[in-house]
Every structure is written in C-alpha cells, then in structure tokens.
Amino acid sequence: MDFSLRTVRSLNRLCKKPLRIISYKGASTTALKEQPNSEILNRFNDDIKAGGVVPVFRRAFLFPSRVALQDEIGIYTYSGLHRAASALSDEISVYLSGDTGMTVAYLCRNDASHVITQWAIWMSGNVAVPLSSLHPPDMIKYFITDSTAKLVICTQEHEKLLRSITSELSVPLLIKGREKEITAQFYQPDSSFLEPKPEEGMIDVGKSNLWYGDSDALIVYTSGTTSKPKGVVWTHSMLNTHISALHCAWQYSANDVVLHTLPLHHIHGQLNSLNASLAAGARIRMLPSFLSYMVWARLLGMGEREDAKITVFHGVPAMYNRLVADHESMFNDSKTESYVRMTLSSKMRLMCVGSAPLPETLYWKWEKISGIRLLERYGMSEVGMALSNPYKPAERRVVGSVGLPLPGISARIAVQSENDPSKLTPLVTVQSSMPDEQRKPHEMLDQTAQFRRVGTPRAPCRAWTCDERTVRYIIFKKTYPVTYLQMTLDVVSDVKIADVIIIISDFPRVSKLSRKR
C-alpha cells in the first residue's frame, strides 16, 4: 500500500503512543551503538593497502543499526539507506544497460533522497553530478550537456523543470518517488495498517574496492566567478583521501551529530558536512535549507533527545551573520543569553566556517554569544579542503587566518617572476604529511583518539593570512585593483545587511585549475 508524504507526516504528529524503534538486531528503545565490525574493518584496511578505496556507501556495513540521517520526513539507519540505494541502483543499471563510468546528473531535495540517489549512482559504478534547483534552466541544461550525462534522476517536485530540458537533449529522465525513503525509515508509526518492517540483512552491492580505487566519483561545478562554471572531477580516491584528512584534523567520529544546511552542489556541503560525516558513522540532521530560526532551534536542541542533539555545524560567514542578527532579537534578556551560551559551549564540539572571508567583528561576536571560537578553513572545488586553523587547542585559532595545510596537502605562496611573468617564484612552501586511511575500531567512536600519520609535518610559517588566500580574486576597474576580499569584508561586517550579490562586468578571463570532461 502506498502512502503520501502528508499521510505519513500526519501519522507521526497524531500518534499518541511512543514510537516503536527498529534496530538491526531487534526492537529496543534506542538505536544500537554497536562497535564497528573488526572483521569487516580489517578487510577494508587490506583493500586500502592494495590500492583500493572503500566508497562511502560500503562503510555502512561498519555501523548498520546506527542512525545515519534525520530529515523533515523521517529517520534513517545506515542499513536503511543502503537497502534503498541498492534498489535504486538496479533501476539505474537498467537505464544504462549495465554500463559503468557514465555520468548521471541528479536533482534531489536536501534530505535522504540525495544520499540514496548518490549512493545508488556509485553502487551502479557511475559518476554522480549533483544539480541544484537554485540554478536557472539554462545553467542546468549546461551542466547536463557539459558533463555528458547519460541519465538524469530527479525527485517528483523537480519533474516539471527537468522534463522539458531532458526531452530537448534526448537524455533519459528517471523520476524518483518517495517510496524508497518511506520504506528505509528507521522510525515508523505504531499502526496496524503501517506496521514497522523488520531490518533485513544488508547485501553487498557495487564493484570491488580495488575498482573504486581507480574510478571517478563526482563532478562538482565551480561557482563561475571568472567564466562559465567548470566541471571538477573527483575520484573515489581523492574523496577518500580528503575524508581521511578531515577525520584526522577535525576528529570526526561516530558520536557526532552534524547539522547540515549547506547546498549540496558545492564541495563544502558534499565533503565537510555530508560524506566525511557518513564515512565516520556520524548522525546527520539535514534541513531543507538554511533558515535562522530553525537552525537556532536545532543548535539549542529544542525537543530533541540527548543522543540527537547537535554537536557539529559547518557554515559560511553569511549564515553566522544571520544567526548573530537574530540572536539579538530572539534572545534579548541576560538569562536567555546565558542559557544559549552555556548550551552551545557545552554541547558543540566543532563549529566551522569557510567559503568566504570571515570578518573579525563577526568572529568575536560569535565567541561572545556561544563561548566558541569558530574554526576557519579554506577550500575550493578544484582542491577540496586545503587549509585549516587547528582543532585543538582552540586558543591557537587565529582570526583573519585560514591556518596551515591539512594532512596530505602542500601549499605554496608564490609571486610572478620579474624576468618571465609566465613563471612563478616560490616564497614559502608548507607541507603536511599524508593521513593514514586505515582505521581501528576504537578510533571511530573516540573523538580523542590520536590518528596515525606518516612522517612529521613541516610548518615554516604560522598561518596563511586573508590577503594571501584571496590573491586570485581581483576585480579590475580601469587601473585600480579592488580585491573581492575587501568588498566582502566591508559588506558582511555590517550586521544590518542580510546578503549581498556582487555583479562584475568586463572581468578578465583567468584560468583555473580544473579538469573538464
């Protein structure tokens, strides 16, 4: 029997009885927090030693009964997401006649449907190209054609938008309904006509780990600052290396509860909040979009059980700017301010910021509000996360700086050669050792575990400063250069301004390091 989203949500609201919780091993009142299976983990480590990569979806075998994600529709375990993705991967394989290495574009909501679709594309051995409804139809058409997508997948609310585009391009369109999310839900209403379904054993699908070690995973498009957006190809190996680097630097673990409000067509949302968290066995609380009052409610744990309260949040300066502005109007008495500060400082393990310059005034305002120093970092679609302030101790985080290279990253400051402008002369080079991608069971549940590294990081300079990190973004007006950084800092520093759009005309063409298919 099929049920509409409205029916399911109404049942959840109206149900007076305690919701029955189904786990991988049986019924209980909480999700099991099992130790990662040592046998499976050892097998994964052996494949990594041999040059393979364990894709994110396959790591679900390490913690099948743990809650992976909660959205506005339901709650899902890792095994539930895996089974739903496995079913969808069969449909994808039929559409592509079993071919692998094909690009598959998809447009889903910021909820479980995105994870299920991405995992299904990877399970079928193909390359995922995330799209966004924020883009106009012409840009979506460009992404589909430029990536040479052989199939487009979307959820029902985006069918009207994509039907005309795919018909014009003669690209098959697979409409994904909600039935897979509903059957994958961890919590089900305790009702005689919608009985909870027992957890079934997970079946390993997809290619071998060695195959994924030499295969593409994602194509993420740049923001198009200098020209048309360029497709950046991310292999499974690249994705896994960056995940290991973030796990090492920021100490992700299966105990994390991550609030996700970032767009999923950029690497910030794909890597930092989504895949790095799922690869660690963490729990993600996914909101459809960033709304300040909803974020405040989740950060303060209003109506949440203890094991579902947020501990990690990744955002951009504009988000923190809006949270600060609404804090002044929502929490305007000393007792409430103290409660907010005490709650955040005691519950939040990590609050990270990036993707745009962080004004110094905003940095200190947020510390006053929350008792937390934001961890500022720097990344790009072309290179992933590159630089970061230290996770510990927080006192070493430098305002106006994006820190040092993350594990496995080498960074260099260079200037144009006076004799030959086409060449660069290095001034400072900073190298950081590669993270160890092999994991032990205790490391996945212990946030204080020391992750193993190879070699000793060399850091001749203290940190990268704002000016050095934004040398690429320069707007020329006649002969007077104005940096994008200066413009953004001036605007975002004013808390009264909610958002800003910078329109650039006659911008000089600047080549960027990206790989276009």
Image: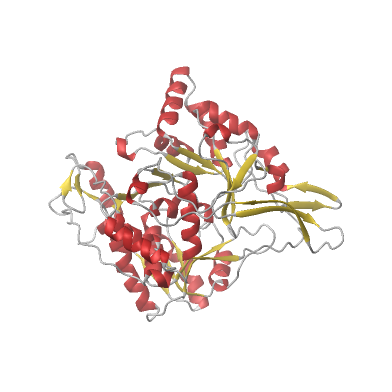
Estimate the x, y position of residue 393 in percent, counting from the top left.
Answer: 52, 34
The answer to which of 172 and 343 lies nearer the viewer is 343
Residue 371 appears anywhere in the view: yes
Toward the bottom, the furthest residue is 97
476 versus 13 height, above or below? below
Where residue 42 sits, quadrant-wise, is bottom left
The residue positioned farthest toward the top in the image shown: 334
Question: Would you place residue 288 above or below residue 156 in this image?
Answer: above
- Relative to 143, say whether 489 is above or below: above
- Report whether 138 appears left or right of 71: right
Q: Quadrant of the N terminus?
A: bottom left
Q: Is residue 258 above or below residue 265?
A: above
Left or right position of 260 against 69 = right
Would you say 452 lies left or right of 456 here? left
- Return the x and y of residue 5 as percentages of the image width and height: 30, 54
Q: Position of residue 385 (x, y in %)?
A: 56, 52
Residue furthest front in the image: 455
Q: Considering depth in this image, is 199 or 151 the residue closer to the camera? A: 199
Q: Would you say 382 lies left or right of 211 here?
A: right
Q: Report the quarter where the C terminus lies.
A: bottom right
Instruction: Determine the residue positioned at 61% across, 48% down.
Output: 458
Q: Quadrant of residue 232?
A: bottom right
